[in-house]
């Protein structure tokens, strides 16, 4: 800051240096903040899926044949209706049966729900089962996390 003729102010160079420093700080902080927001959204999605899995588990205890006459599509529609619009804008929720018995002759004994990122820039996924398992997949790329959640993986990138 120079004083000439009794006036004080910043020179153009000083202002440019200040703007450059602020830009560097923002470029460092913004990705960290974005990941922090995404982790918070994933925690909300996972919590909602756990609540839904608990509801299904309770229904199965009350009535073991609860899932017998349901299709995955009908159950998926029912469960999607239980999820807030804000979460549905960020994640796609899908439900699959946990089958017991012979292939093509088995019967559903539980469900698994997985959340896949729908919002641009999101890469974290999660899955939950009505049998108590709950995993977040965050250690891989977007495609690796999605594949792991769809396969209900219990090892890296899920934990």
Image (tube, rainbow, N blue to C red):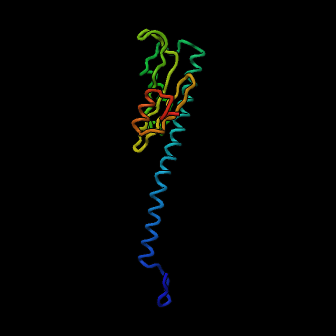
Q: Residue at x 44, y 71 (%)?
A: 17
Left or right of 15: which side holds 132? right
Quarter residue 121 falls in? top left
* Place of residue 56 in the rendered image (x, y in percent of width and height, measured from the top left): 55, 22
Q: Residue at x 49, y 33 (%)?
A: 156
* Place of residue 96 in the rendered image (x, y in percent of width and height, measured from the top left): 45, 22
- The residue nearer to you, when weighing 19 against 69, is 19
Query: How many numbered callouts?
Result: 0
Q: Is residue 135 visible?
A: yes
Seen as rendered, the residue at the extreme front is 156
- The residue nearer to you, when weighing 71 against 133, is 133
Q: Is residue 70 above or below residue 128?
A: above
Q: Is residue 26 above or below residue 32?
A: below
- The residue nearer to you, when weighing 62 against 98, is 98
* Place of residue 5 in the rendered image (x, y in percent of width and height, measured from the top left): 47, 91
Seen as rendered, the residue at the extreme bottom is 5
* Place of residue 144 in the rendered image (x, y in percent of width and height, measured from the top left): 41, 35
């Amino acid at each position: 800051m120079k004083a000439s003729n009794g006036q004080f102010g910043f020179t153009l160079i000083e202002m440019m240096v200040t703007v450059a420093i602020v830009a560097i700080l923002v470029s460092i902080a913004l990705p960290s903040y974005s990941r922090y927001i995404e982790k918070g959204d994933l925690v909300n999605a996972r919590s909602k899926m756990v609540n839904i899995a608990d509801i299904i588990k309770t229904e199965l205890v009350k009535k073991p044949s609860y899932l017998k006459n349901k299709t995955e599509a009908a159950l998926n529609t029912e469960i999607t209706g239980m999820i807030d619009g804000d979460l549905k804008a960020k994640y796609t929720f899908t439900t699959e049966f946990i089958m017991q018995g012979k292939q093509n002759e088995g019967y559903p004994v539980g469900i698994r729900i997985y959340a896949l990122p729908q919002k641009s820039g999101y890469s974290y996924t999660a899955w939950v089962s009505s049998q108590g398992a709950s995993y977040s997949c965050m250690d891989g790329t977007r495609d690796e996390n999605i594949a792991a959640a769809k396969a209900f993986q219990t090892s890296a990138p899920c934990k």
